[in-house]
Amino acid sequence: MTLPSSPRLPSPWTLSAFWFGTAFMWLLLLLILMPAEVVHFVGDADKGKYLGLLGGIGAIVALVLPPIVGNYSDRIGKRLPLIRLGVVVNLVGLAVMGYAAAALGGLTGFWVYVTGFLLVQFGNNYATAPYSALVPELVPTEQRGRYSGVMGMLQAGGQLLGGVGALVIGLLKLPDALSYVLIAAVLLISAVITLRGVPETQLKPNPEARAQRPSIAQLFAHQPFLWVFVTRGLFALGQYSVQPFLQFYAGDVLKQANPGTATSILLMAIIAASIVTALIGGRVSDRIGRKPVIYLAGTVMAVMAIALLFAPNFYVAVGIALVFGLGFGAFSSVDWALGSDAMPSSSSYARDMGIWHVAFVGPQLIETPQGALLDWGNHQGGNLGYSLVFGIAAACFVLGVLLVRNVPETVRPAGAKAVT
């Protein structure tokens, strides 16, 4: 494939709008709605196991689909039509989940809910694969930090709005179905902004370029991609070791009477702080390189993950969440830039970014064993389960920081010093 000679560079806010809606959706689903619905369907005793099962089933779709759809997008030379189709399927899945939550119960309701979640995963990942190609395709290297920072900031903004929405819905005790309607509306509006404001790249078939596309083996032999993939996967493992069970932590460890509301407050603290560092981190990375930002961000996240275990009360936990958010925002600010810099060939952007995306969604599979580990540990007493899963999270963040040193600074802004 070959790109047009001078593709129009869209506003970073327009390009990132779809990521805002996607972040809003996943925060409400994964951290607020799904844990509560699982308890509604199967009860409290097996909540970790069934929540892990739900997340693991969805993660299989997220693991397999993006590289396939990305490869297809590269082959036909189109991005936006595939994004549109994915958004439609996503919306249908939200309708099924809302129906199950509002009208059904027991294991029957749970499996209908799973079906809706699979449609959401399919549709969102179908859209994300071609969407992920737009940053390396349209944005020059020297501006990718800025664009990645805006994406990180809008991701945090979407999550913050999701936390506020969950808090309002919980306090007003609004019907469950309204949450899914709200998610669908935000996702649709954000998708329309991106689809109307981003030019179709109009990739043109080029048999010679297609023949020169790197194979999967060659892609992973490319050192920048290999180490970016590995380190992104480790950070995601850390995130998904804790994130799905945060609501359970608020109830079992922090002893909050309303765990859903408490989780919303913790999340808003993390997200509000992450907004502070998201935009700044991206711009800084354009000047000094990506790795120094990752070093600082990962260290802060690891220390705060452990600190949560020792929080004596909810207010201290909120303070720890604020500091964690500063690290998370800095990491998010360079995430897309680091991935885009690591792409070896413009002829396979969507496929390769789809594979890169697997490093983030694949670790969701850890929810299933982590859910079982959480239940087992807590049955031993003393909240051992939480100590285990939070400890695993911290270890993953530390390992990610150590291994990101292996990412070669093969692409960096002029004048930036190499960091090892």
Image (tube, helix red, strand yellow):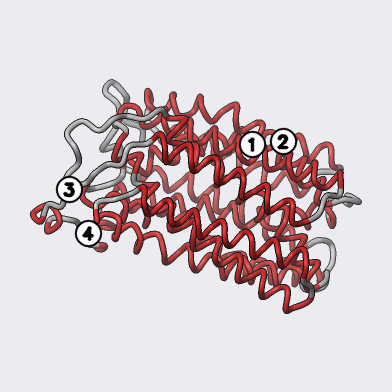
| Camera-nearest residue between 127 and 370 | 127
Q: Amino acid at mark 4?
A: Gln
Q: For residue 218, which numbered disc appears in the image?
A: 4
Q: Which residue is mark 2?
A: 269
Q: Earlier in the sequence, mark 1 or mark 4?
A: 4
Of marks 2 and 3, the one in the foreground: 3
Question: Residue 218: percent from the left, percent from the top?
Answer: 22, 59
Mark sitting earlier along the chain (3/4): 3
Q: In front of the other: label 3 or label 4?
A: 3
- For label 1, count other residues whose C-alpha is less than 10 Å away and answer few (under 14), some (14-19) or many (20+): many
Look at the image and tell me in which quarter the C terminus lies.
Answer: top left
Quarter of the view holding residue 351: bottom left
Label 2: which secondary element: helix
Between disc 3 and disc 1, the foreground one is: 3
- Looking at the rendered structure, the secondary structure element under dot 1 is helix
Q: Which residue is mark 1?
A: 325
Query: Does any portion of residue 117 appear in the rendered image?
Result: yes
